[in-house]
Structure formats: C-alpha cells, structure tokens
Amino acid sequence: MKSSRLNMRRSATTQGKTGGRAPSPSAKTRTRSSTRKPARRQSPVASLLLELGTEELPASFLGPALQQLSTLLATTLREQRLNYDSIRTVGTPRRLVVCVDGLVAKQSALQQEVMGPPRSIAYDEQGNPTKAAQGFAGTQGVSVEALQIRETAKGAYVCALKYEPGRTTSVVLTEHLPKVIQQLSFKKSMKWNDSQFRFARPLRWILALYGTRTLRFAIGGVTSGAKTFGHRFLGVPRSKNGVPIIIKNPASYEAAMKRSGVMVDPQERRTVIQDEVRGLAKSVKGTVYAEHHLELLEQAVNTAEWPHAILGSFPPNFLALPQEVLITAMKEHQGYFSLIGKHGVLLPKFITVTNMKLPNMAVIRQGHERVLSARLNDAQYFFREDRKKSLADRVEDLQGITFHQKLGSMHQKVCRLQSFVPRIAEAIGAHELKDVCERAAYLAKADLSTGMVGEFPTLQGVMGREYAKQDGERTEVSEALGEVYLPGSPDGELPRTTLGIVLGLGDRLDTCTAFFFVGMIPSGSEDPLALRRLAYGFVRIIVEKGLRVNVSQLIAEAEQILKSQNVAKSASNDSVVASLVEFLIERLRFFMKTRYGIADDRMDAVLAARPSTVCDCTDLVARMQALHHIAARPEFDALIGGYTRVSRILQKEQWQDDRINQALFEHESERSLFEALETARVSLDTHLVTHDYAGAMTTLLQLKTPIDGFFDGVMVNAPDQAVRANRLSLLGRVNQLFLTLADFSRIQTSMNSCHTNAKE
C-alpha cells in the first residue's frame, strides 16, 4: 500500500498568501491525507470572524497585536490542516479583529504510518510475531495482524497504519482559538479578575463566528458569542459598553460596525484623517510640520474609532517661545499636528483628531484650545525661569545629576568631554577648533538642569542651543549644542557643522567607552543603556561624513581619561579597546548590509585583513565597496579560484616566508609570475596611497593569467628542496600582495570548492 502525500492548498495571508500545509512529520511518523485531487475542494467553505473587545489599547499596541493575531492564527490553521483563502486583520483601540475567508468546514483526514522495530526483531524465523511486534501493536492501538512491512534504506521495518478522520472546523476552532488568544503578548500586560488571565487591557467581549455558527468558548472570564459593541458615544446610549450588536455572519460585520460609529479598518481611518488634515491645513494657507507627521498620523489612526479632524488656535503671543518648544508641547502632551506657514514660520494653529463627529464641534475645539494654552503657559513659565541663569552658570549644577553610579556625576562627564573632544578635532584635522571645542564640551550638558528639559526631555540639546544663543555664545558653539544628539534615530539627520560632528562623536564614544570600562557591555538582545543605538550613530557620522580617523586610538585616549578620574575598571573586560572596536565593527557591518547590500563574506574578507591596532571605518567601507563591485565582474571568480589554491598550499605547508631567489627559477612561468608581482606591487602602492581601492582591485585581476600559468607550468612540490622552498615563497609573495586589500580566501564563489591538482 503506497502512502499518498498530504494535500493542502496554499492560501493567502495578510499580505497575500499563506500556507495551509500540515506540520512536518517526525522521523518515524509519516502523515498522509485521504485527499488525492489537490485542485478540487473536499468540503464547503465559510468565513471565520474573531473580535476581541477590550478597554482602550495604547496606540503603540494595536499594530503589533494585529500582526501577532494574523501570524498565530495562520500557524494554528496550518497545524490543524484547515485550508483557507485569506487572512485579514483590522482593529481599533477597543477591538482586535481577524477574518479568515474561504475556510473549509472540515479538517483533511490523516493516515499515519508509524515505524516500529525491524522485521528481524518483530518476527521469528517461522514468521510468527514476537513480543516486540505485539508490544508495538498494542501501543499503537492496532492488531498484530494489521501490522505491515516497509522497506527502508536501513532494511525492512514493521509499521502501523493509523487513520485519523478530519474533525469539523467549528469543533477545532472552539478548541484552539482560546490558545491563540493566550499566546498574544504585549510590552505590558495586566490582570483584572480572578481568572488570572493576562492581556494588554481588560477583555470585555469576544465575538466568534464561523459562517452563521457561533463558536462558544471562555477565556479571561469572558464567554464568546455573537455580540459586539459599537462606538462608546455615537448612536448608542451612554452605558458602560453600549447596546449589544448581534452579528449574524462575518460578511455583515463591517457594515454593522459603521452603522454603530466604528471604522474597523485602520487604512480607511488613515485615509480619512489624511484628507481632513490636509484640507484644514490648506484652509489657513499652511502645511503640517513634516518631521512628526507620520508619527502623529499613526497615533491618531490607533486612538480613534470614528476620526474627525478639527482646527484650533492658540494665542499668538506664545510664538515668542522657541519654535521647537511649541511644536514639542503640541506633539508630546497633546498629539497635535503643528502647522507651518510661509518661509517655515510656525502658525498659531493646530489640528487635532477627535474620536467622534458631532453637529457642533465648537465645544470640543474650545476644550482643546484651553488645554493647549495651559501647556504653553507652563512652557512659558519654565522658559522665563530658565533665563534667570546663564547656561554657563548651570554647569556646576551638573554635580548634583548622576550620570551613572559607577561613573559619577554628569559634571565628571563634562570634564571628560573637555579633554576628549579637542583630541577628536585634531584627529580629523580640524585643528582650528581646539579652543572652541573646549567651550562647546563645557556647555554640552548644561541644559539638563533647566526646567524646560525637565518638562520636555526630548528638547535636550535644542534648549542648549537656544539658551546659548541668548547668552551670546559663539554661533558655532550654540549650533553644536543643538546637534550633539544627532542622529536621534537610525535614519535621522546627521550634524551639519564640524563642531557639531566633533562634539557628537566625543559624547557617543565617551559614553560607550565608559560603560565598557566598567563592564556594562550589551549581551544578546539586552541593551538597557542603548549603546547599540549610540554606536550606530557614531558609525554613521564617521562613514557618511567621510572622516579618516583611527577609532582604536580614540578609544585608548578615552580610556586614559577615565583612568585619570580614578574610575574603577571592571576586571571582566581586560581590553576595552579590542571589545569596543569589535562592538563598533558589528554596527558597521549592519550599516553596510542594510545601506549598500554588501554580502557577509565580502565584509569578512576586508575585516580579516584589518591591522589589529587600526580601525578606520571610512577606509574599511571603501574597501568593502570596491570588493563588492569588482566581485560582480566575470573574471573575478576565476581569480579567486587561483588564489584559493595559493592559500590552501600555504596553509597546508604552514609557509610564511616570501624571500625569493631568482636564480632558482627553472621555468619561464616562475619568472613571469615574479615580474607580474613586482609590477603589481608598484601599482598597488600607488593606488593605496590615494585610497583608490577600485584601481587596486583591478590590479589584482591582472594577476590571474600569471598565477594560472605558474600552476600549469611547474609542480610546487619539486624534488629539489631549495626549488620547492623558492616556489612556496613565490606563492607567499602572492598571498601577501592580496592581503594588503583583503583576505580573499573568505570569499564564497563557485571556485572555492575546487581542490588543488596533482602538480601541487
């Protein structure tokens, strides 16, 4: 009896397609379906609708929760052998919804083929079943007579055939949907009743339908049914959850929700908000402040069930405050869109998105205006109080602010920056900035003691710049204070001024070095101090600004400054320089892979040839890019094939000498290779001086013919030991020449697997 393969048809996921295949069988269990015609559906289909009604979810929870719900349900359906056409998730702050279309009414049947003991053990010489066969049959729930023999690569084995009919979909879903819900995870969860069930917010109702059938199960003290609830205030009495809405089938769900004041589709809400916000901004001849637009839009989408944008205003006298203060106050505390007029000037207007649309929105608009005015009054108060003391006079206050318990106060960090930042300026060739660097470093953290930064932490640096301007500090100093924390995100804007670049590099490298010095090194996914983010910003500045600097030397200098402050070094990290350089290189690898698509083996080749005492990120990037481009040329694989033979021979012989005696040459191919190497050395030196790595790589390509000619013309393992040693040294010279650019033996090509031939 031949086993048939499991027949499960492919189905669409949230993005389009998802699998409906059964899980892989174990090594000794084979599964097969009773279905033989994959093109023909074996049972009728219907749609599944699952809605989890909750108290209002935080805006940041909605998207990840819907993605999890889709993934978990798709996995469950696949494991339970339930075919479907598509999965779609929608949701609002009060509901997580998943709909599965084209879901079959019954599982595919399974026939399991469970392998048992070898035939020689299961049956005696007369063909009678032994205790082994009887025991196996008993454990599998079949009779001994039903056991069959299967020929395998290891011989003949006994097997038991077990048939498992498919269960109805409603039964399977009733059993497994609670498990799907239990697997949903959130950044923060809570318990609210005796059930001890944890969820992001209290679960209030569960709507579960398969076609017209209601699926009944209980979780978190809530029993599922066919009821849902609409908008809290639109079209229903103002009770706790409103009047229940009975959903008869999944197809009627979205229309029924709209009648009750709920747009369940986030994309529909997004379109409505975008159109209304754009129209309101245009009505006052303004545009939405672009930097926060997408973030605020997503927040509005995930906090409203029936969004409606309204235009409000604030007193123009608040425009005397720095523009960033007003924009931050509107964004951070209220989630308002700021409006920019001509020439980038902030308008005394804002747009907010409410959760309902009423005939008269004036009361709601006035309420938002009063709240914002109160916030701006607070900001105005902090600004006036801050101005009673200059930024420079605030530096001493930093002694009362702890940077870290193992590293002392923020004032100690400022002292380190004063020593360190001028050294970075010299390292990048900005010698003229030495004096102004010390002043910028001195003021870099002073705004931490201001009331404005205390109220709006995201304004750190911004307020330093504004207060420095008002204090009459030099323009380059004030601008640098505003750029010290750039980039603020992985793809954020970089510092534009040279002093801002130097100050930002110094601040980041001092922080990373300090924490590595005291042994607080990120491990695995844990990075509570956000050192990976700081390191990535450091790498971006270095590389994108094209700065040529030995980072290893800078780290060593930062470490010496820490020692001068008598900071206790951790015994767990003997080499701060080596470990931090490796940490930065990992960020560089991520940058090159995501930004330029450089393959790992190309990066490995370049990094393996890096001198241990030098880490020039810009130089490494240039080499990686040159290798990436040269590797696309058709002759490159053949060159690497020849070099791989060279590398293997040298590794096998443990040969490191490259001293060559021309008098020992016996074949013209030896002299040809020697002369080609001498020519290539001169050419390489010229290219390396100018950092023309593309030209240097092209020079190496020209060595393909003489290397191939050498292997064709002579046998490396010559009988005469002196000739043999000379030929090995000639290959050693080839190896050294290649290593000036990269360790090409790490590059993966189709030629890497070829073996050295007999002449070697």
Image (cartoon, rainbow, N blue to C red):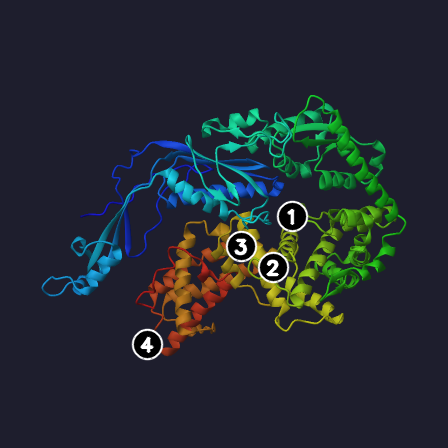
Q: Amino acid at mark 4?
A: Pro
Mark 3 and mark 1 in contact? Answer it, CB < 8 Å.
no
Q: CA distance from mark 3 to mark 2?
A: 16 Å
Between disc 4 and disc 2, whose residue precedes?
2
The answer to whether residue 640 shows anywhere in this view is yes
Image position of 689 (left or right of 338) = left
Hey, which residue is sitting farthest left in the picture? Answer: 126
State the image coordinates of residue 719 (x, y, percent, origin top left): 32, 76
Nearer to us in this view, 260 or 514: 260
Image position of 367 (left or right of 26) = right
User: Which quadrant of the view contains residue 157?
Assistant: bottom left
Q: Label 4: which residue? A: 719
Between disc 3 and disc 2, whose residue precedes?
2
Mark 3 lies on a secondary structure that is helix
Mark 4 lies on a secondary structure that is loop
Q: Amino acid at mark 2?
A: Leu
State the image coordinates of residue 743 (x, y, percent, origin top left): 48, 62
State the image coordinates of residue 11 (x, y, percent, origin top left): 39, 37
- Viewer-side label of 4, 3: 3
Q: Give the numbered dot on residue 584.
A: 2
Hey, which residue is sitting farthest bottom in the picture? Answer: 721
Q: Give the numbered dot on residue 624.
A: 3
Question: Pointer 4: residues within 10 angstroms few (<14), some, or many (20+)?
Answer: few
Q: CA distance from mark 3 to mark 1?
A: 25 Å
